[in-house]
């Protein structure tokens, strides 16, 4: 069961059909374009959880930053030295 406050609340379930054992899971969440509120220039020591704590007061909302910046698929991508100086869009806490 998914908690009602989860970002996956309201996401449709998925069960594969066909031969063999089925896989129960969730379908992809539908994401619209996020409205950027701020721009943050990434520094060498920025981490997604720390940025989420700074901007939202909650380090567990790091995924919100990645939802708004689809060019980075994984949170670890933001730790690479090659992203220093690039701009990260900071969306509102809720859309």
Image: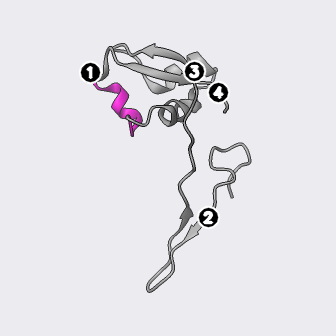
Q: CA distance from mark 1 to mark 3?
A: 21 Å
Q: Residue at x 71, y 49 (%)?
A: 3
Give the image quarter of residue 24.
Answer: bottom right
Vertical side of 88 occupied by 23: above or below: below
- Is residue 54 magenta-colored? no
User: Where residue 53 appears, x then y in whole percent?
Assistant: 57, 21
N-terminal of the two: label 3 or label 4? 3
**Range of magenta residues:** 72-81
Q: Which mark is residue 54?
A: none
Q: Residue at x 53, y 55 (%)?
A: 28
N-terminal of the two: label 1 or label 2? 2
Q: CA distance from mark 3 to mark 4?
A: 11 Å
User: Where residue 44 appears, x then y in whole percent?
Assistant: 33, 14
Q: Residues within 10 Å of mark 2 (few under 14, many from 20)?
A: few
Give the image quarter of residue 82.
Answer: top left
Q: CA distance from mark 1 to mark 2?
A: 38 Å
User: Circle 4 is placed at which residue position?
Assistant: 93
Q: Which mark is residue 13?
A: 2
Q: Are marks 1 and 2 in contact (CB under 8 Å)?
A: no
Q: CA distance from mark 2 to mark 3?
A: 30 Å
């Amino acid at each position: 069961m998914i908690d009602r406050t989860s970002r996956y609340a309201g996401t449709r379930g998925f069960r594969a059909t066909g031969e063999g054992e089925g896989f129960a899971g969730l379908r992809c969440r539908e994401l619209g374009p996020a409205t950027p509120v701020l721009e943050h220039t990434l520094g060498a020591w920025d981490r997604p959880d720390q940025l989420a704590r700074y901007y939202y007061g909650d380090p567990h909302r790091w995924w919100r930053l990645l939802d708004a910046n689809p060019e980075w698929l994984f949170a670890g991508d933001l730790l690479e030295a090659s992203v220093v100086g690039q701009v990260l869009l900071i969306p509102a806490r809720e859309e």
